[in-house]
Image: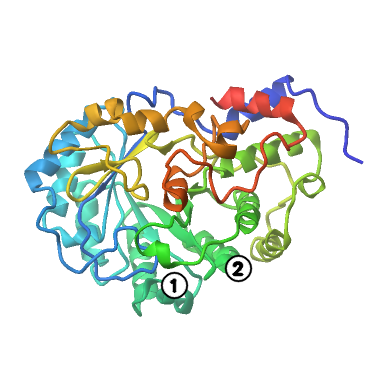
């Protein structure tokens, strides 16, 4: 029988609630937490999920060097402190002015991160130049614990080895390294072993991305919502092993709050939540790869999720200057060639709508977690054509979690 409920208003409960989901210390209506700029779509890979549908050669309409500098000036103008700034692609190394742009961003005070592809351009020499130019962090993709799984997904042989070699070189150069993993039918059972490699080689964060049906990703099979739920609960356990976050799985924040409420009450998760066979299988393997970690102990997570979403703390600028709420939500909100990014971010009707949880439809609009979750707006659009529709990969029925008073404490503390 479950233990008697704790007082949700007790200091310990309020402290746990405060730490469940991180919240920006500034108004996300006025400035983003992170800006991602797609410096080019050129890339030598043909990844099965690529949102950019990248091609080998650069587009003639890419932002010029001078336009890129003006964009970075506009991003710096959001501060202080400025938003996190990520240069992605395609493959950023395809831009010959990359090192000059990184140096310029560093000079004006931007914390510059770069997200290169695992190709032959990922060399120690190129990484060294990035570091010398001032880049502080790097993100690399690892979609399998073996070359067979990873290279099949990336559709080029050798990518796995190039990625691991670049990872080791980046760490030796002093980069903060984030490892990105796309979850799909190709690797869902491999996740604990990917975690094992991330732990062995060392990374600042493991970012687990849940597929959005856009670009080439439209051709890939989707995971059932119940499997996604199992994976999210596995990630909650895995967060006791290493620092991790999710991308396009905003309902992970709901899972975190549910699990922490149950831990505060001393109730095993399986007594309340519909944990399935995928979760049990992943957890068993996690115990094997991390036998030194007590997965049942209510230890603090190594990284709590951040309360940002498409257009709400997050904004994406394409290679041609088009502004989107996210790289996976291909609705234009403006163009930096026509308006400064701060003006677009603050005044775009699309972005303003995405920042209003009362505009959400379906189950998301009725959900008690909507102010700290909101669901993937990108996936809602990819599936239904409506960016404000309900999250299609979330099986949760609003109000079905039994400890609603506790939920209100957590949601209030993190909103």
Residue 207: x %, y % from top left? 47, 52
Asked if residue 78 lies left or right of residue 2, the reply is: left
Asked if residue 235 lies left or right of residue 32, the reply is: right
Q: Nearer the viewer, residue 404 or 36?
A: 404
- Kindly state the secondary structure of the residue where label 1 is placed: helix
Q: Nearer the viewer, residue 318 or 165?
A: 318
Residue 248: x %, y % from top left? 47, 48
Name the colour scheme: rainbow
Q: Is residue 107 visible?
A: no
The residue under the point 73% across, 25% down is 405
Q: Which mark is residue 189?
A: 2
Marks 2 and 1 sit apart, C-alpha to C-alpha, by: 13 Å
Q: Nearer the viewer, residue 403 or 358?
A: 358
- Kindly state the secondary structure of the residue where label 2 is placed: helix
Residue 378: x %, y % from top left? 42, 47
Q: Is residue 297 visible?
A: yes
Query: Which comes before the other along the chain, label 2 or label 1?
Result: 1
The residue under the point 23% across, 33% down is 75
> In the figure, 403 relative to 137: above or below?
above
Image quarter of the N terminus = top right
Residue 74: x %, y % from top left? 19, 32
The residue under the point 16% across, 66% down is 57
Asked if residue 9 lies left or right of residue 151, the reply is: right
Marks 2/1 in contact by CB < 8 Å: the verdict is: no
Asked if residue 305 lies left or right of residue 64, the reply is: right
The residue under the point 31% across, 44% down is 331
The residue carrying mark 1 is: 150
Q: Quadrant of residue 224?
A: bottom right
> In the figure, 54 relative to 410: above or below?
below
> In the figure, 223 relative to 12: above or below?
below
Q: Which mark is residue 288?
A: none
> In the figure, 34 relative to 197: above or below?
above
């Amino acid at each position: 029988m479950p233990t008697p409920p704790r007082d949700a208003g007790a200091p310990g409960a309020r402290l746990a609630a405060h730490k469940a989901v991180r919240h920006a210390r500034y108004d996300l209506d006025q400035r983003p937490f992170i800006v991602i700029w797609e410096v080019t779509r050129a890339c030598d890979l043909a990844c099965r999920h690529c949102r950019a549908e990248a091609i080998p050669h650069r587009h003639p309409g890419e932002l010029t060097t001078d336009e890129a500098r003006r964009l970075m000036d506009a991003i710096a103008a959001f501060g202080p402190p400025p938003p996190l700034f990520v240069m992605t692609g395609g493959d950023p190394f395809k831009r010959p002015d990359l090192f000059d742009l990184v140096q310029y961003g560093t000079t004006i005070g931007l914390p510059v991160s770069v997200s290169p592809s695992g190709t032959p351009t990922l060399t120690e020499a190129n990484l060294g130049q990035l570091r010398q130019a001032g880049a502080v962090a790097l993100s690399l993709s690892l979609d399998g614990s073996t070359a067979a799984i990873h290279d099949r997904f990336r559709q080029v042989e050798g990518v796995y080895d190039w990625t691991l070699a670049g990872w080791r070189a980046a760490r030796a150069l002093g980069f903060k390294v984030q490892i990105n993993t796309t979850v799909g039918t190709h690797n869902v059972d491999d996740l604990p072993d990917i975690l094992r490699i991330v732990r062995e080689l060392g990374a600042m964060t493991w970012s687990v991305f849940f597929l959005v049906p856009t670009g080439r990703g439209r051709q890939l099979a989707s995971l059932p919502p119940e499997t996604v739920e199992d994976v999210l609960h596995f990630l909650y356990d895995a967060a006791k092993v290493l620092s991790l976050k999710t991308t396009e799985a905003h309902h992970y924040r709901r899972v975190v709050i549910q699990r922490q409420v149950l831990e505060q009450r001393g109730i095993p998760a399986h007594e309340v939540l519909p944990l399935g066979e995928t979760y049990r299988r992943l957890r068993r393997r996690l115990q094997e790869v991390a036998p030194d970690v007590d997965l049942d102990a209510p230890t603090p997570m190594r990284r709590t999720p951040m309360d940002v979403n498409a257009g709400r703390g997050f904004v994406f600028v394409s290679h041609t200057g088009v502004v989107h709420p996210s790289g996976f939500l291909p609705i234009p909100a403006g163009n930096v060639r026509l308006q400064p990014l701060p003006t677009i971010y603050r005044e775009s009707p699309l972005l303003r709508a995405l920042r209003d949880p009362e505009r959400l439809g379906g189950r998301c609009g009725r959900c008690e977690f909507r102010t700290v979750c909101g669901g993937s707006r990108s996936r809602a659009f990819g599936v239904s054509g409506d960016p404000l529709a309900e999250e299609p990969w979330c099986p949760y029925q609003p109000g079905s979690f039994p400890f609603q008073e506790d939920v209100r404490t957590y949601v209030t503390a993190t909103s």
